[in-house]
Image: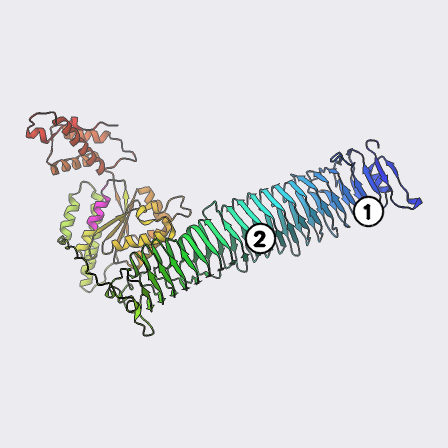
Amino acid sequence: MAQGTVQVTHTGTSRWRRRTGEYASLAAALEAAADGDVLTVAPGTYRENLVVQRAVTLRGPEGSPGSVRIAPVDGVPLTVRASAVVQDLHVEGQDSAAPAVLVEEGTPELRDVRVVTRSAAGIEVRGSARPTVRRCAVDNPAGVGIAVLDGAGGLFEECEVVAAGQSGVAVRGGAHPRLERCRVHHTSGSGLSATGENSALEAVGCEIYEVRGSGVQITGRATAHLTDCDVHRTTADGVTLDTDAVLTLADCRIHDIPENAVDLRSRSVLTLTRTTVRQFGRNGLSVWDPGTRVDANQCEIFDSTGDYPAVWVSDGATAVLDSCRVHDVPDALFVLDRGSRADVVDSDLSQVRNTAVSVSDGATAQLDDCRIRDAATGAWFRDHGSGGTLSNCTLDGTQTGVIVTKGADPTVERCTIDSPAEAGVYVSAGGRGSFQNCRVTGSGGYGFHVIDGSRTSLRKCRTERCTRGGYEFADSGADGASGTGPVVEDCTSDESAGLRAPAARETAVQTVNHSPGLLGALPEQRTEPAPPAPAAEPEQPSRSSKAVLGELDALVGLESVKREVRALTDMIEVGRRRQQAGLKAASVKRHLVFTGSPGTGKTTVARLYGEILASLGVLEKGHLVEVSRVDLVGEHIGSTAIRTQEAFEKARGGVLFIDEAYALSPEDAGRDFGKEAIDTLVKLMEDHRDAVVVIVAGYTAEMERFLSVNPGVASRFSRTITFSDYGPEDLLRIVEQQAEEHEYRLAPGTAEALGKYFTELPKGPAFGNGRTARQTFEAMVERHASRVAQVAEPSTDDLTLLYSEDLPELL
């Protein structure tokens, strides 16, 4: 057969339709051929726009794949409008407004066709066409790989989209193709997309990867069903559903996704069965908006590579997890916003770095027969309106089993919390909650720790082997009035749980239904004699405010600070006297912000300020408790609230001084737990405004940023006091005071040398102000000792005089 000719073989028996022979062009051969004819195309390049309108077979020569190139200058290279067979062709298109292969009618079969093009679509199927496409490949970096449109269908088997400038496979306009064992990769848009009402996509055994958009995108009332498919290595989300989309994933694998593995919203519905989701950068399942729902059965979500919850349900959406496993993730399940709901049945949540279940902003979570293991916090119901039920669940190896805060009100029944490191159940900040037939064993802290007068209900609960005690009820309420604090009935503990005397929590425990109450139901305490209490240290006599202010005045420098403290003290004192006289007193917020460099006396002034307030009767004790970020922020969410609460309790009646407070709100905060410490602190300052004075301190610029990004904190403080750096004269005075206190003297000329030394001393970020002055004195004493140690019989002057040569060298 000659180059550039077409061999037509007629298979019919009619003499007058016999067309066997060779034709110089494909168009002529197609015009001459009848249904059933076979057109064998010789190797070569054909610059023709072919239209197949009869049920013929159009093929290249056997054993020479890719030798026949259909490559017209423009337009559609190959159009099929009949139930023909097209095989072993290489199709090239250059028209960005037209497809390379267009199938418009019939049930044709395309086999082993390779499309290399820069067209609107590599293969486009539309209208009533229902082709079968086998082992075909599409390389179209300018447009869609395969487009099925306008009610068309078809079967695509073992096909490959090797590149696409848009979607790899696009389904719209009510089309409904089926893909079997296909591969779609290196697309600039979605791997698979379906959009529009009545559009449907079915894929079995397919692989979608190396996709710049979403792996699978279903939108606008379209539906899809994927079975035994792999979606991985995308740039955007793995699977996206939007606007009433419906998708079913069965036995699929979604992995290596930098964003959300699955994201659905706007009333979309997703059903997952025996599907694994792993190695995702944001959420494994991200579910948004009222009417949006995900149902997962026998699925596994694990191995997160980011810092986000594995399952995120918000804005009124619903998620159901049945017989699922979620593990090796930062957080397992977050449910947010009123109307949002998660139902989890017979599932395992384990190896969770932070919180296994978090419920907030009015959302609801229902967990039945679930197992939570190796999590920082098992379940945290965060705020008012948030609740749900934990039923027949086990929580093992957590830091804190269940946390209830800020008015949240869950029901926890028939649950077992084993070996929590800090507390089995922790309720604070007005949290509520009902706990019935629950058991806490092996706690490193308390079994049940309820504070702030939280109105928690405990019925038929039991604790065993709790290190700090089975039950702890602190602070029955702001006023200690009846009706606040937990309601306890028929609760018990083992004998080893060092329980406190009932009088310590009488106002906190309210028994109901004529129950003997918590302590009445507990086993009797062991009768071993208690060790004798250590002798109490004699209390230091409190000083008057005048005496404390005298010590403040004696501090070197700090003139503006002294004026601020005196003005504030005068306001408080006059206010107290006006109240005693029956007059209205101006409201004075006593919380302060101290700004300035290290070593400028902030801690010292804070201590004196507390002592002044105690002398005026404003604070009960006036003691100082100094903390920093490391003392308040734990390694997981639950411990931060507990640590902050404990620090606040230590400072009750005095001053809580938070040094470098800006570290609680770093510029790249993200999911930093410092915000939790701030939120807890603000709530405590509001609830116990007369019990503790809080002073936050740090560098000036950093504290300004800290207050600007935390308006809730800024509003709690009355004023900012700036501590200026010490000048050379101030530093000299500090050295002179140190020398006098330690019985040293400055030799003639040493004071002048010190003044010059402090003037020339670099004042960079490491400059410590008063601390630097004290370090300078200590260095002088060391050099003096090295010098005098060489003197056989030193005189008193030798032992006491510091000379300029004792000064350390400037670096």
Which residue is depicted at the point 26% across and 27% down?
Answer: 811
**Residue 241, label in figure:** 2
Front residue of 174/224: it is: 224
**Residue 365, label in figure:** none
Q: Mark 2: which amino acid?
A: Leu
Q: Residues within 10 Å of mark 1 (few under 14, many from 20)?
A: many
Q: Secondary structure at mark 2?
A: strand
**Residue 603: within the magenta?**
yes
Front residue of 759/805: it is: 805
Callout 2–callout 1 Cβ contact below 8 Å: no
Front residue of 158/793: it is: 158
Q: Is residue 106 above or below residue 113?
A: below
Q: Is residue 474 above or below residue 729?
A: below
**Residue 781 vs residue 714: left or right?**
left
Q: Position of residue 424 (x, y in %)?
A: 36, 58
Residue 590 seen in the current view: no
Span highlighted in magenta in the image: 599-609
Which residue is depicted at the point 93% across and 44% down?
Answer: 15
Residue identifier under label 1: 55
Q: Position of residue 243 (x, y in %)?
A: 58, 55
**Residue 451 vs residue 264: left or right?**
left
Main secondary structure found in the magenta portion:
helix
Q: Mark 1: which amino acid?
A: Ala
Q: Residues within 10 Å of mark 2 (few under 14, many from 20)?
A: many
- Residue furthest bottom as drawn: 514
Q: Secondary structure at mark 1?
A: loop
**Residue 556: within the magenta?**
no
Q: Earlier in the sequence, mark 2 or mark 1?
A: 1
